[in-house]
């Protein structure tokens, strides 16, 4: 198939009986010059280049993960009695911002070939040549990850461990390995999503409490529901790019049962939090139930009546779910 001026050689995926087109491995490392005219980058205004790098770092994703880490720090301080000075708070958030943004820069470079193929992502800055050469993304990512590891290591070994696990899981396990080879990619790759909140807790206490485990598990369990509903809606897009998301390479009923299962685990995790920390009060419990039960109901409805519209509704509802639940916990901790 041909994308722009770039010719892709196709391979075939044999997995669960379904076949998915797979980009040739050599395409993975091609420069952005194959599809765009990066020479024009020199004539772009500086603010356009700056905006391109901001887009590369995916600020909305960074903001969500940083928020979970911030809540982890506040809840840890409120639950354990450890002090949380403004300086500690700023240093912890700086480490998480650098770590999550650095991972996004690295994965943006790794995934630029499939991003060009998918309609949903083909306008990203590495695909259009707005960042050229593409290796600039690697340099930026390496600097940010270096900063995150230094700040983590200076705080305590547990913070360094959580930061390292998050980076390795996101960049190596998910993006470089499982994203293109396994239908369970987002399950194992989603572990990195739970690391910021565990990091935040450890940044304050130097340890890991039951509440931190539940919060991290909440993020990890939310990720498949969120991503699989999107993949169900855009199955053709993922198949064209050769990404074996579960709804793409597994029969529909099995994939939807897995989505219901993750939702069925997600709700108890969120509702169990008041038994792990006293700061999660009745108000938190009401919000967690008010958003968690409809999320589970939508998953069940999609399983009973699978439609792209139903998948998109579930995706859009799940998008703010995590932020709302963590916000309820933050309010409860500060009340």
Image (tube, rainbow, N blue to C red):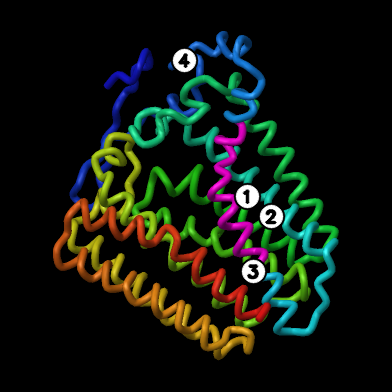
Q: In which quarter of the view is residue 142 placed?
A: top right
Q: Which residue is mark 2?
A: 96
Residue 239 placed where, x, y %?
A: 27, 40
Query: Which numbered tag is attached to residue 71?
Result: 3
Q: Residues within 10 Å of mark 2 (few under 14, many from 20)?
A: many
Q: Do the residues under discs 3 and 4 have CB atoms within 8 angstroms?
A: no
Point out the frontmost of discs 3 and 1: 3
**Label whose residue precedes the other's in the sequence (3 or 2):** 3
**Label whose residue precedes the other's in the sequence (1 or 4):** 4
State whether the magenta stretch is mostly helix, strand or loop.
helix
- Marks 1/4: CA distance? 27 Å
Q: Do the residues under discs 1 and 2 have CB atoms within 8 angstroms?
A: yes
Residue 65 within the segment the image draws in magenta: yes
Residues 41 and 257: in front is 41
Q: Residues within 10 Å of mark 3 (few under 14, many from 20)?
A: many
- Marks 4/2: CA distance? 33 Å
Query: Which numbered tag is attached to residue 36?
Result: 4
Residue 210 placed where, x, y %?
A: 61, 82
- Marks 3/1: CA distance? 16 Å
Query: Which numbered tag is attached to residue 38?
Result: none
- Marks 3/2: CA distance? 12 Å
Q: Secondary structure at mark 1?
A: helix
Residue found 69% across the figure and 31% down from its top = 139
Magenta span of residues? 53-71
**Label whose residue precedes the other's in the sequence (4 or 2):** 4
> Left or right: where does residue 330 sit relative to residue 225?
right
**Label whose residue precedes the other's in the sequence (3 or 1):** 3
> Left or right: where does residue 222 sit relative to residue 99?
left
């Amino acid at each position: 198939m041909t994308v722009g001026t770039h010719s892709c050689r196709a391979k075939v995926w044999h997995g669960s009986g379904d076949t998915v087109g797979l980009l040739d491995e050599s395409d993975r490392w091609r420069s952005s010059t194959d599809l765009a005219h990066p020479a024009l980058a020199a004539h772009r205004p500086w603010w356009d280049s700056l905006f391109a790098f901001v887009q590369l770092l995916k600020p909305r994703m960074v903001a969500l993960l940083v928020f979970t880490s911030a809540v982890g720090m506040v809840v840890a301080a409120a639950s354990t009695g450890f002090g949380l000075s403004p300086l500690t708070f700023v240093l912890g958030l700086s480490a998480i911002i650098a770590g999550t943004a650095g991972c996004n820069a690295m994965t943006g470079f790794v995934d630029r070939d499939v991003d060009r193929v998918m309609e949903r992502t083909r306008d990203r800055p590495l695909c259009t040549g707005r960042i050229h050469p593409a290796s600039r993304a690697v340099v930026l990512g390496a600097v940010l990850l270096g900063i995150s590891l230094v700040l983590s290591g200076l705080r305590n070994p547990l913070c360094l461990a959580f930061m390292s696990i998050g980076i390795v899981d996101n960049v190596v396990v998910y993006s470089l390995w499982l994203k293109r080879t396994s239908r369970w990619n987002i399950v194992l790759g989603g572990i990195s999503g739970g690391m910021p909140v565990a990091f935040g807790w450890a940044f304050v206490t130097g340890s890991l409490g039951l509440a931190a485990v539940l919060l991290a598990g909440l993020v990890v369990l939310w990720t498949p529901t969120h991503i699989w509903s999107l993949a169900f809606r855009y199955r053709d897009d993922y198949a064209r790019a050769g990404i074996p998301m579960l709804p793409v390479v597994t029969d529909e009923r099995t994939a939807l049962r897995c989505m219901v299962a993750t939702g069925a685990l997600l709700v108890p995790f969120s509702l169990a939090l008041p038994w792990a920390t006293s700061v999660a009060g009745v108000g938190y419990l009401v919000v967690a139930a008010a958003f968690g039960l409809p999320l589970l109901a939508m998953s069940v409805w999609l399983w009973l009546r699978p439609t792209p519209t139903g998948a998109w509704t579930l995706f859009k509802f799940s998008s703010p779910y995590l932020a709302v639940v963590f916000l309820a916990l933050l309010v409860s901790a500060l009340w």
